[in-house]
Image (cartoon, rainbow, N blue to C red):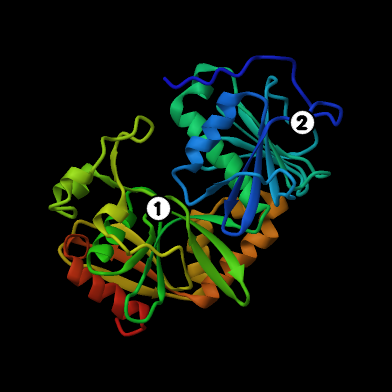
């Protein structure tokens, strides 16, 4: 069990007369994030977590104005404000909001954004065994960080991103864990496609277009994927499963696919895969409305986090207009043959496939 040794003190309200907490500064996708934490261990948790993302630690940035600030509370977790609409979220947790205030609690921990400070994200680690477990701590840091990034116009997407080598068109593979994102991204990288991430992306608007940005650095594949030979010849690059994600083996993609990283792409196609274990794959073109529904299914925070929802929904709608959507039934031909995967995805990304 992973423990966070933040002392228990009376519930704080982050009053204006309190001394400023020590701050760390980070840059992500052109945005500037500040993390304030009284306890060095809390600051270290964020630093370690950010090290796994395409996030840069900054030195000498104390005078700069951050786009968002994450403040780690050292007191006990406050109660949710009264008078807010309350509902359960997919994957666990309870959200409270009135469209201006946002309060999310999970495993006894909490994230809060108050209406009067819309770019200030307050986070508390709960004191229970469940709250201090490694997976719960990692999830809380992710939730707090994504809450801050949404206030900077950056919106998370549970998907892989790759770039077609001939045209430079971006392709996203979007879906829940186990849907084949990492396997397909790995096969396309083997076939010479550039990669952003196999699992975690950020979306934002750049001019009139929606752009996808790389977030997570490592790839993570399941043992069945390894057994299927997707990484044949590269087994020595696989790390042991992480304690909070024991079903997946991680590897550094730049070690296997050097000079193939792309930090951003303009998506022209979005695939929503389901692994079928059949011998052949099939794809069905989706309408713009169907594509939007699929995106909403995998991006529930576009509805949960209501203060940020208008901008979030706008980015998803822009993506649905910009990129061709496909429902993909991924068979063994696609997931075990890099050359076939490349042809299959390329044809549909160019509008040539049926």
Q: Position of residue 307 (x, y in %)?
A: 72, 51
Tell me: 146 left or right of 3.
right
Secondary structure under tag 1 reads: loop
Residue 328: quarter of image: bottom left
Q: Is residue 11 visible?
A: yes
Q: Position of residue 22 (x, y in %)?
A: 68, 31
User: Quick one: label 2, few (<14), some, or many (20+) residues within 10 Å?
Assistant: few
Depth check: 162 or 56 in front?
56
Residue 39 sits above or below residue 141 on the image = above
Task: Name the quadrant of the C terminus.
Answer: bottom left
Depth check: 153 or 109 in front?
153
Q: Which residue is mark 2?
A: 20
Residue 242: quarter of image: top left
Tell me: 93 left or right of 250.
right
Residue at 53 percent of width and 49 percent of height: 56
Residue 213 sits above or below residue 79 on the image = below
Q: Position of residue 265 (x, y in %)?
A: 46, 69
Secondary structure under tag 2 reads: loop
Single out the mark in the foreground, 2 or 1.
2
Residue at 33 percent of width and 78 percent of height: 348
User: Quick one: label 1, few (<14), some, or many (20+) residues within 10 Å?
Assistant: many
Q: Are marks 2 and 1 in contact (CB under 8 Å)?
A: no
Q: Position of residue 153 (x, y in %)?
A: 65, 59
Q: Which residue is mark 1?
A: 199
């Amino acid at each position: 069990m992973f423990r966070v040794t933040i002392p228990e003190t009376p519930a704080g309200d982050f009053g204006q007369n309190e001394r400023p907490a020590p701050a760390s500064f980070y840059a992500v996708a052109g945005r500037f994030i500040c993390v304030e934490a009284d306890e060095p261990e809390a600051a270290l948790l964020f630093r370690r977590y950010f090290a796994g993302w395409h996030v840069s630690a900054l030195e000498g940035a104390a005078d700069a104005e951050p786009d968002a600030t994450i403040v780690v509370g050292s007191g006990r977790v406050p109660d949710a404000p009264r008078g807010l609409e309350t509902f359960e979220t997919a994957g666990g947790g309870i959200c409270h909001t009135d469209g201006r205030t946002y309060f999310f609690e999970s495993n006894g921990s909490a994230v809060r954004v108050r209406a009067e400070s819309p770019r200030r994200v307050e986070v508390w680690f709960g004191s229970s065994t469940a709250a201090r477990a490694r997976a719960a701590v990692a999830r809380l840091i992710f939730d707090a960080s994504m809450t801050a990034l949404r206030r900077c116009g950056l919106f998370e997407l549970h998907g892989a991103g790759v770039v077609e080598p001939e045209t430079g068109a971006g392709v996203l593979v979007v879906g829940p864990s186990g849907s084949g994102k990492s396997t397909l991204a790995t096969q396309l990288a083997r076939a010479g496609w550039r990669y952003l991430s196999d699992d975690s992306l950020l979306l934002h608007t750049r001019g009139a277009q929606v752009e996808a940005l790389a977030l997570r650095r490592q790839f993570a594949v399941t043992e069945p994927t390894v057994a299927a030979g997707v990484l044949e010849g590269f087994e020595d690059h696989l790390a042991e499963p992480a304690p909070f994600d024991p079903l997946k083996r991680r590897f550094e993609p730049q070690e296997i696919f050097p000079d193939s990283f792309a930090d951003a792409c303009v998506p022209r196609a979005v695939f929503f895969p389901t692994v079928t274990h059949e011998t052949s794959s099939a794809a069905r073109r989706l309408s713009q409305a169907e594509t939007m529904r699929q995106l909403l299914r995998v991006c529930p925070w576009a509805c949960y986090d209501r203060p940020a929802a208008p901008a979030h929904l706008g980015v998803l709608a822009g993506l649905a207009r910009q990129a061709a959507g496909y429902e993909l039934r991924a068979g063994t031909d696609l997931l075990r043959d890099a050359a076939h995967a490349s042809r299959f995805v390329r044809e549909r990304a160019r509008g040539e496939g049926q």
